[in-house]
Image: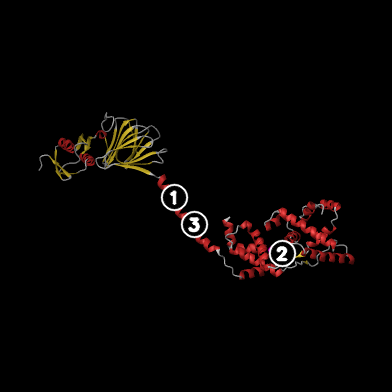
Amino acid sequence: MKNEKEILKWFNNELSGKEIEDLKRSEDLQTLEKINHYASQFEAPEVDIRAALEAFEARNHSKKEPKIRTLNYKVFYRVAALLAIVSASAYLLFSNSITSFETSTAQTKSVTLPDHSEAILNSVSKLSFNEKKWAVKRDLTLEGEAFFRVRKGQAFTVSTASGTVKVLGTQFNVKRRKNYFEVTCYQGLVRVDYKQAAIKLPPGKTFRVINGTIEEVENFKAKKPSWLEQESSFDKIPLDQVIAELERQYDIKIKTEGVDTSKLFTGSFSHANKQIALQAVTIPLKLSYRVEGKTIIFYNYGVK
Amino acid sequence: MSDKKSKLCEENHFRDFYVTNVQSATNFAYYKCGDGQAALDLVQDAFAKIWENCSKIDFSKVKTYLFTSINNLFLNTVKHQKVVLRYAKDAPNLDRHNQSPDYLLEEEEFRLKLSNAVASLSDVQREVFLLNRIEGKKYREIAELLDISQKTVEKRMSGALQILKSQIENI
């Protein structure tokens, strides 16, 4: 065969009629043409597909693998589910990672926040914030009392059960105790959202709520809260609040006998010496006290 | 891909695959062994093998797998027979208009010669030649089915044609 390539193409139906004619002229293809024609008339026995399929299925073949596969899938799904749960909970844990700081009785703690703002916690207080979201939102939750020195930046929000305090960059003190909410501004400008009202506090001003009543407070000149100097100062504060502060600064219980705890107290007590502190509170109010173990009892002076 | 693999394990899909391919697979087996019943048996065995291993077989390769299985089963089990193929009934002659008795006889003779010549081809040449001639498959398709290169198919085809030509012309 001379034109092997062309002949192969011809048998593969790749040649046009004209090309076949050309090929025939160049070589004697009589035999091949007959082969081409008659070979395609061979017949293979036709399969009765339906019968063949029935016969095939009648063999009742066992599939070996699928059972194992389903088992594998179960294990796989279990592992996948487990992984999903673990990763989801890990994600939730991390993304909502709340950092919190707590102080107990007679303890203060200085906390440096991620943007180098500073918070100083007074006794029995808790401060928490979301460290991950700090760059976007400077949100803090406060229970108790803390003094803040805020670096300039986006809004800095302190949420308490009584109200929220918003600032840009400033120094202020937030005190939230039972029936008591007080925000004191030392520098910059502080906005207090209390119930529906928004109060702006310039330096030297105090916003105070006692038992749900907003109190008038005189201006002050201090640069920072007195408690940072180991002293608690009070300006016309009901005695029960003063007692609560005493209990927080010293690990004691104070009870009163026949004392009007709504009496207002102006003055201060030291965090250093319990006796002096107790005297500093009782003497101006004409009270006496006695110690019974860990409990201290206040009573009116001169009463047995 | 695992999706399609599992499909093969589903009875409906397997049945589709069976129905689509059983004829061409049987033809292929028949070209090899020249016995219709033996060819079908081979094919049934090959399908059974695929069904058993349905989870392991890549769906895109399952046709090749089928033909390779038939080939292997054939080599293992069936003894070589002389493959004598029958012609389709009423197959037309090359020149349909020439009805002279001489011509008709001549063509009948040619058919017989061709039949004998095909029987003398080697297995691999015959399968390529018949897949091309009877089933009209392109070399590329044959190459895919048998999992060999197209070049090999062409070589076998060329060899087959040369043998057929020389055998027919020499007799």
Residue at the spot of label 3:
A76
Q: Secondary structure at mark 2?
A: helix
Amino acid of disc 3:
Phe
Specify which label sits upstream in the sequence, 3 or 1: 3
Badge 2 and badge 3 in a common chain? no
Q: Position of residue A146 (x, y in %)?
A: 30, 37
Neighbor class of circle 2 (other Cα within 10 Å; few <14, some 14-19, many 20+) is many
For mark 1, does the 10 Å Cα neighbourhood hold few (<14), some (14 to 19), or many (20 or more) residues?
A: few
Disc 1 or disc 2, which is closer to the eye?
2
Residue under mark 1: which chain is it in?
A
Tell me, yes or no, whether dots 3 and 1 are on the same chain.
yes
Find the magenta span and give its range: B23-32
Q: Is residue A48 visible?
A: no
Residue topped by disc 1? A88
The relative height of residue A87 versus residue A51 in the rendered view (above or below) is above
Label placed on residue B32: 2
